[in-house]
């Protein structure tokens, strides 16, 4: 116990100052809480671009998803001069993105989710580039070495369907499997892109389901992967193209797949062997990348073919592919 009057005065001042600081901090916290309660439905500032249809509209339209799982703002109603497809929107670059930012800030009317049909955020891209064995834990699952360079294959654009569309089991295959993947959407044309410059060519990210016919991928057609990967409906995408500036770190996102509610894949994009920048640099050595091109970056472990015994999709199954910050796509198997 301090006996000196002078020191006691000093300590009293310190205690008083501490109490005032604590009171001030509590007041700031209370103010923030009150503001949160006052505006419980504040729109997200994230840029979540979508393609959609609605009964009262003619043909596809461009929109903004008002937060993950929210309704849709009609961008074409906000500015009728905007294109109505994502590829054309991306081709126009910063000019169209600035319009979308203004629409996001304007707190426009939101179409209820129940009144719109979500299309894939990108349809008819020039190419869909896919990457095989690009997760460390997926390589361990197969007991194969981690690749020293990216393993590239492709899907045809005709395999793309919307985030809630049905996946059709083809009669030609008895071994249809699931694969949740992070998809990169290219924003501008480029060739021989350096890894250090690659993110400047990225528009954003979305969720992909790389549906795979394992019998055709692994045993038929000379074991080339293309046919087993590219049946119609084998590339559900969505629900939104989330712009790159809306994501804290695309290489640190939880990623999972559920079949009939059971978690079958659960990992993190930090397990990717080759990150977005390396993939863009690698692929652009061989081909020119165009706005709207999609790169599927590989799948984590837990696919059906490597289970013991193997498990494949059947009629009536429901597959949910989800990535943190990007959303969830849900596809019924028919």
Image: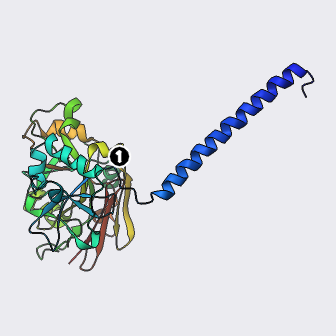
Q: How is the image coloured?
A: rainbow
Secondary structure beneath dot 1 equals helix
Q: Is residue 272 above or below residue 309?
A: above
How crowded is the residue under tag 1: few (<14 C-alpha within 10 Å), some, or many (20+)? some
Q: Which residue is mark 1?
A: 271
Q: Residue at x 12, y 50 (%)?
A: 89
Q: Is residue 71 above or below residue 94?
A: below
Q: Residue at x 9, y 35 (%)?
A: 191
Q: Nearer the viewer, residue 4 or 223?
A: 4
Q: Nearer the viewer, residue 317 or 253?
A: 253
Q: Residue at x 35, y 74 (%)?
A: 260
- Horizontal and vertical percent for residue 114? 27, 73
Q: Nearer the viewer, residue 118 or 224?
A: 118
Q: Quadrant of residue 110?
A: bottom left
Residue 281 visible in image: yes
For the image, the number of numbered tags is 1
- Horizontal and vertical percent for residue 171? 12, 77
Residue 311 visible in image: no
The N terminus, quarter of image: top right
The C terminus, quarter of image: bottom left
Q: Residue furthest right?
A: 3
Q: Residue at x 81, y 29 (%)?
A: 12
Q: Nearer the viewer, residue 46 or 215?
A: 46
Q: Residue furthest bottom?
A: 316
- Horizontal and vertical percent for residue 323? 33, 56
Residue 104 is left or right of residue 267, and the answer is left
- Horizontal and vertical percent for residue 188? 12, 40
């Amino acid at each position: 116990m301090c006996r000196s009057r002078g020191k006691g005065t000093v300590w009293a001042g310190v205690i008083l100052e501490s109490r005032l600081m604590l009171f001030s901090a509590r007041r700031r916290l209370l103010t923030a809480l009150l503001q949160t309660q006052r505006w419980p439905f504040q729109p997200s500032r994230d840029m979540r671009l979508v393609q959609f249809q609605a009964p009262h509209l003619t043909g596809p339209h461009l929109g903004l998803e008002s937060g993950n799982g929210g309704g849709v703002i009609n961008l074409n109603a906000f500015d009728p001069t905007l294109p109505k497809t994502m590829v054309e929107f991306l081709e126009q670059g910063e000019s169209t993105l600035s319009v979308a930012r203004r629409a996001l800030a304007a707190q426009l009317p939101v179409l209820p989710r129940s009144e719109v049909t979500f299309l894939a955020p990108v349809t008819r891209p020039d190419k869909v580039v896919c990457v095989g064995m690009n997760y460390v834990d997926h390589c361990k699952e197969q007991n194969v070495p981690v690749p020293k360079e990216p393993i590239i294959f492709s899907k045809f654009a005709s395999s793309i369907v919307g985030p809630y569309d049905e996946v059709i089991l083809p009669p030609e295959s008895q071994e249809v499997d699931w694969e949740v993947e992070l998809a990169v959407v290219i924003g501008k044309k480029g060739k021989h892109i350096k890894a250090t410059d690659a993110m400047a060519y990225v528009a954003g990210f979305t969720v992909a389901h790389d549906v795979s016919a394992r019998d055709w991928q692994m045993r038929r057609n000379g074991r080339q992967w293309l046919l087993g990967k590219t049946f119609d409906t084998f590339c559900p995408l969505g629900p939104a193209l989330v712009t790159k500036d809306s994501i804290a770190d695309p290489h640190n996102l939880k990623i999972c797949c559920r079949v009939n509610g059971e978690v079958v894949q659960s990992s993190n994009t930090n397990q990717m062997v080759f990150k977005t920048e390396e993939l863009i640099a690698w692929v652009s050595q061989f081909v020119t990348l165009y706005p709207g091109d999609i790169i599927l970056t590989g799948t984590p472990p837990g696919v059906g073919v490597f289970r013991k015994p193997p498990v494949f999709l059947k009629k009536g199954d429901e597959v949910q592919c989800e990535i943190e910050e990007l959303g969830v796509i849900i596809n019924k198997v028919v």
